[in-house]
Amino acid sequence: MKSLGKYLKPVRFTLIIIALIVVYAVSLKITQFDPLKLVVSAPKAGKILGEFFAADIFTRSSGTTTYEYDFPVPCGAAAEAVQQTSGPRIEMDIACGDPGQAFDVHGVELEANTVVDLLWVFPDGNSLNAGRFTTDSNGEFSKEIEIRPILKTTDGVPVKLRADVSTKSTHLVFTDTVNDVVDAMVVTIFMALLATTIGTIFAIPLGFMAASNITRHGPIGTGVYYIVRALLNLIRSYEPLVLATIFALIVGYGTPLAGILALVFVTTASLGKMFSESVEGIDSGPIEALRATGANWGQVIFYAVIPQIIPDFLSFAIYHWDINVRISTIIGFVGGGGIGYYLSQRINSLEYAKAGTALYAIIIVVWILDFLSARIRKELV
């Protein structure tokens, strides 16, 4: 038998290896695992990741410089404007004219590759578009426009020829994307705060009822213990994404309420489980002493249990707020609101630079909250 066993061990080992190879081979076939696609898609990945890393955070502050001149139609109907002769300016071949006459407008010493909008402005404030142009690399442009009969001077008040020139300064400012991301991130933080607070309130009584050393005494207490345990396990079996999807269908896709409700369920189940284990781990001495004096259930909880579990409860609740902020960024993809919903919209719209801004914000906020929660929990221990 010993000699037979000596030969069977290598055979059994070989069969196990063969079985594992077959299982992994089938897995590769079923999942269509193809690492070469990463190589083939490298150029596409480089472009997308480049936009993600670049992000949309800063831009040059911009404004508009306006040049405006009185333009009598016909000549002599009003005083002519004096044109600039130096510096960035708009020049006209003529300072007045007759209906139907054409003349050239020139841009001189303006910013390169900037947009210029020409408008005829009437005395009552209404305007007529005369064209949109872009300056060349030297900051110049030259366009011909026509004097229309509607531009005729009325009661000695001429129309004005106005040029609105877009300008960019060297001053860096935050983009509108940053403002949108900050707003969404604030929503996410307070979503997690509300969900953690409400979930903690629900989890405290459930945690006591799910603690064997508190409720598992007599038929009724034992029944309560198993029912609450089963309820907590049932809720914990559902992923936040599933719950967020369900609530998004009920209260509206992309609303923060959907995310809050999903997080409340998750937080209640998770903290209820943690609270019950914390209660079960307390020193039983004070409990037994109070029971020996004839104290009721409420007195035992208030005087023997609560003083021992307050630090743990606070630590768990703060830690779960940190967790809920992270979960909030994910449930937003299924309509839970907050930064996750914003990120989902930007990715679906192929706005990868804006999505990158959201990712940076998530990383920064999660890192800060992780640091703060760790410090607070350390102080509570």
Image (cartoon, rainbow, N blue to C red):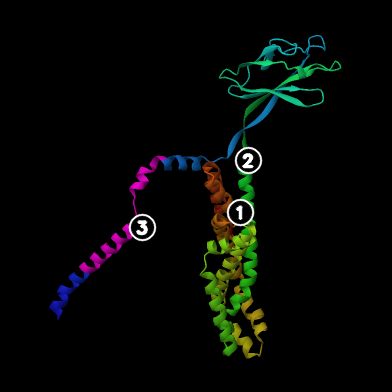
Mark pair 3, 1: CA separation: 33 Å
- In primary-sequence order, the first of circles 2 and 1 is 2
Amino acid under label 1?
Gly
Q: If the image is split into quadrants, where does the N terminus sit?
A: bottom left
Identify the magenta region: 14-43
The residue beneath circle 3 is 31
The mark that comes first in sequence, 3 or 1, is 3
Q: Quadrant of residue 212?
A: bottom right
Q: Is residue 91 magenta?
A: no
Q: Residues within 10 Å of mark 3 (few under 14, many from 20)?
A: few
Packing grade of label 1 (10 A; few <14, some 14-19, many >=20) is many
The amino acid type of the residue labelled 2 equals Asp
Q: Where's residue 42, x and y in %?
A: 39, 42
Residue under label 2, please give it.
Answer: 176
Q: Is residue 381 visible?
A: no
Residue occupying image coordinates x 56% and y 64%: 243
Check disc 1 and report the residue beneath it. Answer: 338
Tell whether 275 sits left or right of 74: left
Dot 2 alpha-carbon crowd within 10 angstroms: few under 14, some 14 to 19, many 20 or more: some
Mark 3 and mark 2: span between their CA atoms?
42 Å
Q: Are marks 3 and 2 in contact (CB under 8 Å)?
A: no
Give the residue type that dot 3 points to.
Thr
Q: Secondary structure at mark 2?
A: helix
Q: CA distance from mark 2 to mark 1?
A: 17 Å
**Labelled pair 3, 1 in contact (Cβ < 8 Å):** no
Vertical side of 340 occupied by 170: above or below: above
Front-most of 104 and 308?
Answer: 104
Q: How many marks?
A: 3
Residue found at x 57% / y 66%: 266
Position above or below: 156 against 309? above
